[in-house]
Amino acid sequence: MAGTMAVLAALAGCSSTVRVDPPTPSGEAAEACRRLAGVLPATLDGAKRTPSEPASPYVAVWGGGEITLRCGVPRPANMEPTAEVADVNGVGWFQDPSRPLLFTSVNRVAYVEVTISREHAPGNVLVDLAQPIKQAIPE
């Protein structure tokens, strides 16, 4: 769950590794998330990909934790059946009203959770993630 995600930067020389608790998807969602891991961009909204630990095909981090992605998370707990979902280039995103920097793609076989710091424009990040998500995760 998003609330259990721990993001701690541990400095190692000039590089940093970000700690993110990976989700544990299974079946079709796990397969889709592994496909997504192979097509994610090296840079998002100017932030470069950063190592994360533990290593997981279900987690991606950019900018030292400024943007984190977790694939295969559960359905957002506070997403009501009538919740508004924004379409960004064919991917539906639920923005958690209690956590405005948390977005979850919800119209595919795997839920993809993205946390975006205030240093980045959510629209830019979600646009850049739309094609890889559509390519890797079926509706």
Image: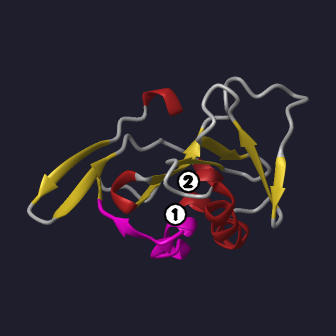
Q: Quadrant of residue 97?
A: top right
Badge 2 local density, few (<14 within 10 Å), some, or many (20+)? many
Question: In the image, is 135 to the left or to the right of 40?
Answer: right
Task: Give the residue drawn at x 65%, y 44%.
Answer: 103
In front: 123, or 10? Answer: 123
Residue that carries the numbered disc 2 in the rendered image: 30
Say what amino acid the circle numbered 1 marks: Arg
Residue 45 rendering spot, x and y as whole percentages:
54, 68
Instruction: Count the marks.
Output: 2
73 to 121, vertically: above or below? above
In the rendered image, is residue 43 in sight?
yes
Q: Which residues are magenta?
A: 34-51
In front: 35, or 83? Answer: 83
Return the residue found at the far front.
119
Question: In the image, is 49 to the left or to the right of 80?
Answer: left
Label 2–label 1 contact, CB within 8 A: yes
Residue 93 rendering spot, x and y as whole percentages:
75, 48
For residue 34, the mark is: 1
On whether residue 80 falls in the magenta region, the answer is no
* SS for dot 2: helix
Task: Give the residue drawn at x 91%, y 29%.
Answer: 82
* SS for dot 1: helix
Q: Quadrant of residue 64?
A: bottom left
Task: Give the residue drawn at x 80%, y 50%.
Answer: 107
Say what amino acid the circle numbered 2 marks: Ala
Task: Give the residue drawn at x 43%, y 28%.
Answer: 4
Residue 6 rendering spot, x and y as whole percentages:
36, 35
61 to 77, vertically: above or below? below
How much space separates mark 2 and mark 1, taking CA atoms? 6 Å
On whether residue 45 falls in the magenta region, the answer is yes
28 to 35, vertically: above or below? above
Work out which quarter of the rendered image holds the C terminus and state it: bottom right
